[in-house]
Amino acid sequence: MKKHFSVSLFAALCAAPAAADGILSAEEFEALTLNKTYLYANEDGVYGDETYLPNRRAIWSFGDGNCMSESWFERGEFLCFLLDDRQAGEETCVLVREEEGGVLKVFSPDFAGDGVLTAIESDEPQNCTTTPETPSAPKPAPEGGGRSNGSRLGAPNSGKG
């Protein structure tokens, strides 16, 4: 039932015009998040954190200190994130909406539970026990549709993929 609800919610968000829904474009997302760290939570609690860097680069962690470098790009209304150790087609694509008070809502039918992550800006830097290399240029955007295959959506204690 929950999976059906999250897919329905996602489909409704996709069907409506971006401006009406407040879905952020890549430029809006970048302006909002650049050089900041956000904490992400789902209905079960803290999910992870991400620091956004120049050139559409980011560092993701499930909050366990294992930090992974990735690039992100726009595909239609979707923002897609691809870990550096993954291949094209293994990206996670989401819709992001800014809510009141700077809270971000991140939607994907592949997220567990209700399909939504909530993100707030953190005053604290990421606590990385592993430091990924961060290339200065993003990977080229892979071809294809906006749906992800879940590469970033695994349970926090199982790692990505």
Image (cartoon, rainbow, N blue to C red):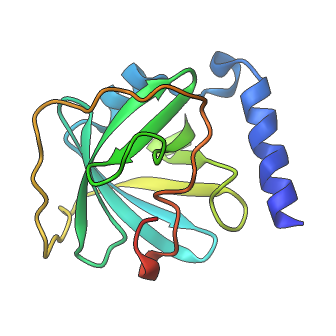
Image-based side of 19 in relation to 153, left or right: right
Above or below residue 70? Residue 157 is: below
- Place of residue 83 in the rendered image (x, y in percent of width and height, measured from the top left): 32, 51
- Is any part of residue 98 visible from this angle? no
- Who is closer to the viewer here, 50 or 138? 138
- Toward which corner of the image does residue 22 lie, by quadrant? top right
- Toward which corner of the image does residue 78 lie, by quadrant? top right
Above or below residue 153? Residue 16 is: above
Image-based side of 87 in relation to 127, left or right: right
- Is any part of residue 6 visible from this angle? yes
Which residue is painted at 85% across and 46% down in the image?
Answer: 8
- Toward which corner of the image does residue 21 lie, by quadrant? top right
- Place of residue 128 in the rendered image (x, y in percent of width and height, measured from the top left): 16, 70
Which residue is painted at 26% across and 32% down in the image?
Answer: 139
Which residue is painted at 74% across and 34% down in the image?
Answer: 13
Which residue is painted at 10% across and 34% down in the image?
Answer: 136
Above or below residue 92? Residue 160 is: below
Count of numbered labels shown in the rendering = 0
- Place of residue 6 in the rendered image (x, y in percent of width and height, measured from the top left): 78, 54
Looking at the rendering, in which quadrant would you find the N terminus?
A: bottom right
- Who is closer to the viewer here, 51 or 153? 153
- Place of residue 81 in the rendered image (x, y in percent of width and height, measured from the top left): 40, 43
Which residue appears farthest toward the right when viewing the image? 1
